[in-house]
Image: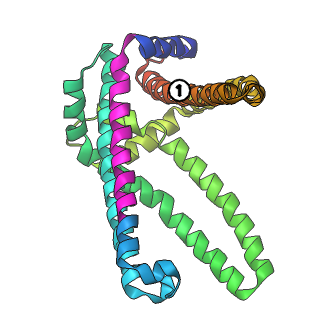
């Protein structure tokens, strides 16, 4: 049986012994900031091109050019999103694999992983997105038809559909839980469809591992969240009391609050990296049974 305590300690060890693991995550964040900037610029362009829509003189649904612009922008954003995500995941997971197996990696290797795994990850992401979207869209249509016939029928179908969606998405989480380590550890000639099949097969054969690792990751998330919430209580009290001491107190209270928010962001960032390292460590660990 896997020694999960040992895997946890090893994952924690990597957090401070191999700082290179943070580099691909930071690069990924910058890439997504680039996407956010693109969306912002699209918004500014929309305002400039369609002032009558923005002023309310013309309804947005009544303006074919405005709707076409939105549809085109959303399509471009989705393509860019999938590409950025695939490249970012290639950067991260290649480095995570190196660190877990070799104990080290490098920024040079990171860039090669982003390029090397890009197409494979993109194809896998598209397949998984289809797995997620198609049933959800189908159930949404069923609910829509239900409401078009009768409100009560629609509400019943909506409740059933929500439960089915939750159950279905949980099943997908189970099947694709270790798909990332599988992507970066299989031969280059393996197709995306075969990787999906391998992920399903692995989860079925190692169901206990999937459940235990998932529960540990949930527990870590809950623990960090509770700690941050408890830590925020005295910070909130101090930030509320200090401003009563005048302008200097108000500035100090605001500074303390901002500092704690920054520390919370860093803590969640480190937690996210730890969870991915733990996931990869659990996948590549040898089962002694």
Would residue 219 be seen by someone viewing this image from the given angle? Answer: no
Predominant secondary structure in magenta? helix
Picture residue at 23% right of the left edge, 36% below the top: 187
- Quadrant location of residue 136? bottom right
Picture residue at 54% right of the left edge, 29% below the top: 262
- Quadrant location of residue 22? top left
Question: Is 210 on the left or on the right of 67, as rendered?
Answer: right
Task: List x then y, in percent, for residue 197.
Answer: 39, 46
Quadrant of the drawing holding the N terminus: top right
Task: List x then y, in percent, for residue 155.
Answer: 76, 73
In front here: 135 or 87? 87
Q: Which residues are magenta?
A: 17-42
Q: Is residue 37 magenta?
A: yes
Looking at the image, the residue that sits furthest to the right is 152
Question: Is 11 on the left or on the right of 68, as rendered?
Answer: right
Question: Is 147 on the left or on the right of 74, as rendered?
Answer: right
Task: List x then y, in percent, for residue 173.
Answer: 53, 44
Question: Is 43 on the left or on the right of 251, as rendered?
Answer: left
Element type at mark 1 = helix
Q: Is residue 152 magenta?
A: no
Q: Is residue 19 above or below residue 81?
A: above
Q: How is the image coloured?
A: rainbow
Q: Residues within 10 Å of mark 1 (few under 14, many from 20)?
A: some
Picture residue at 49% right of the left edge, 62% below the top: 133
Picture residue at 64% right of the left edge, 54% below the top: 166
Circle 1 residue = 271
Task: List x then y, in percent, for residue 174.
Answer: 54, 42
The number of discs equals: 1
Would residue 238 be seen by someone viewing this image from the given angle? Answer: yes
């Amino acid at each position: 049986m896997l020694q999960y305590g040992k895997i946890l300690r090893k994952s924690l060890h990597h957090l401070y012994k191999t700082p290179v693991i943070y580099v691909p995550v930071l690069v990924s964040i910058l890439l997504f900031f680039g996407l956010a900037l693109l969306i912002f610029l699209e918004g500014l362009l929309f305002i400039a091109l369609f002032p009558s829509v923005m002023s309310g003189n013309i309804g947005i649904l009544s303006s074919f050019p405005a709707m076409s612009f939105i549809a085109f922008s959303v399509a471009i954003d989705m393509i860019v999103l999938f590409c950025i995500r695939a490249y970012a995941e290639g950067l991260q997971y290649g480095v995570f694999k190196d660190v877990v197996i070799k104990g080290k990696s490098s920024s040079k290797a990171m860039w090669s992983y982003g390029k090397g795994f890009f197409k494979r990850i993109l194809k896998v992401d598209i397949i998984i997105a289809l797995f997620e979207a198609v049933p959800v869209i189908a159930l949404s249509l069923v609910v829509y038809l239900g409401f078009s016939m009768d409100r009560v029928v629609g509400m019943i179908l909506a409740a059933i559909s929500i439960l089915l969606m939750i159950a279905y998405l949980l099943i997908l989480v189970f099947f694709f839980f270790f798909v990332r380590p599988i992507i970066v550890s299989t031969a280059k000639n393996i197709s995306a469809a075969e990787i999906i099949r391998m992920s399903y097969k692995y989860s079925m054969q190692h169901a206990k591992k999937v459940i235990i690792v998932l529960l540990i990751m949930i527990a870590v998330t809950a623990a960090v969240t509770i700690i941050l919430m408890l830590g925020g209580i005295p910070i909130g009290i101090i930030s509320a009391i200090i401003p009563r001491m005048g302008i200097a107190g108000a500035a100090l209270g605001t500074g303390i609050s901002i500092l704690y928010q920054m520390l919370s962001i860093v803590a969640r960032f480190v937690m996210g990296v730890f969870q991915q390292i733990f996931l990869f460590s659990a996948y590549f660990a040898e089962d002694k049974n």
